[in-house]
Image (cartoon, rainbow, N blue to C red):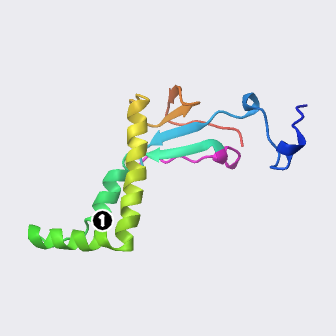
Amino acid sequence: MVCWPSSVQRFGPLRPHHLLPPPLRFFTVHAQPVTVPPTLMAQTRVAYLDEPARLEQSFSANLPQPPEQAAAVVQQRLAGPAGQQFQQQLQAAYAGVVRAHELKVLKVPAVVVGGRYVVYGQTMWLPQ
């Protein structure tokens, strides 16, 4: 049993670093969705590598054909609250793509354990 000083205990239960489960990062596409067990949600992130294209397609839906009119509509969309939300979502989506590139993920689905070990596969069974 690990005992923490009383000054640390008031912030809630803490565990030594070596007892914490390693962080997991899933990289996939929407055609191969990932289901994360509830017991692993806290240390897991899922990045859909096709999300930037999906967001851009959704944002540019129903644009008029003339380029000048389409540009004006895009500017209006970007200026509103939905435009700010779109930009934040797009930034987060591209962050996942960049991270996959940094980790040299070559195919999906992929799981990165502890930020270092890449595991590829079609299905992965994780205990509940």
Residue 51 image position (x, y, % from top left): 38, 52
Q: Is residue 62 visible?
A: no
Q: Residue at x 30, y 71 (%)?
A: 79
In this rendering, the count of numbered labels is 1
Q: Quadrant of the N terminus?
A: top right
Where is 17 relative to 29, above or below?
above
Q: Nearer the viewer, residue 32 or 106?
A: 106
SS class, disc 1: helix
Q: Is residue 76 above or below residue 26?
A: below
One can see residue 41 in this view: yes
**Horizontal relation, residue 100 to residue 18: left or right:** left
Q: Nearer the viewer, residue 23 or 49?
A: 23
Q: In this rendering, is residue 51 above or below 122? A: below
Task: Spot the residue most to the top.
Answer: 117
Q: Residue at x 90, y 34 (%)?
A: 3
Which quarter of the rendering shows the C terminus?
A: top right
Q: Residue at x 40, y 31 (%)?
A: 102
Percent x, y of residue 77: 29, 72
| Quadrant hosting residue 67 | bottom left
Residues rendered magenta in the picture: 31-42
Residue for badge 1 = 59
Q: Is residue 91 left or right of residue 37?
A: left
Q: Is residue 124 magenta?
A: no
Q: Nearer the viewer, residue 25 or 119?
A: 25
At label 1, counting other C-alpha atoms closer than 10 Å, the crowd grade (few under 14, some 14-19, many 20 or more) is some
Q: With 76 as the anchor, is 13 left or right in this view?
A: right
Q: Residue at x 83, y 43 (%)?
A: 8
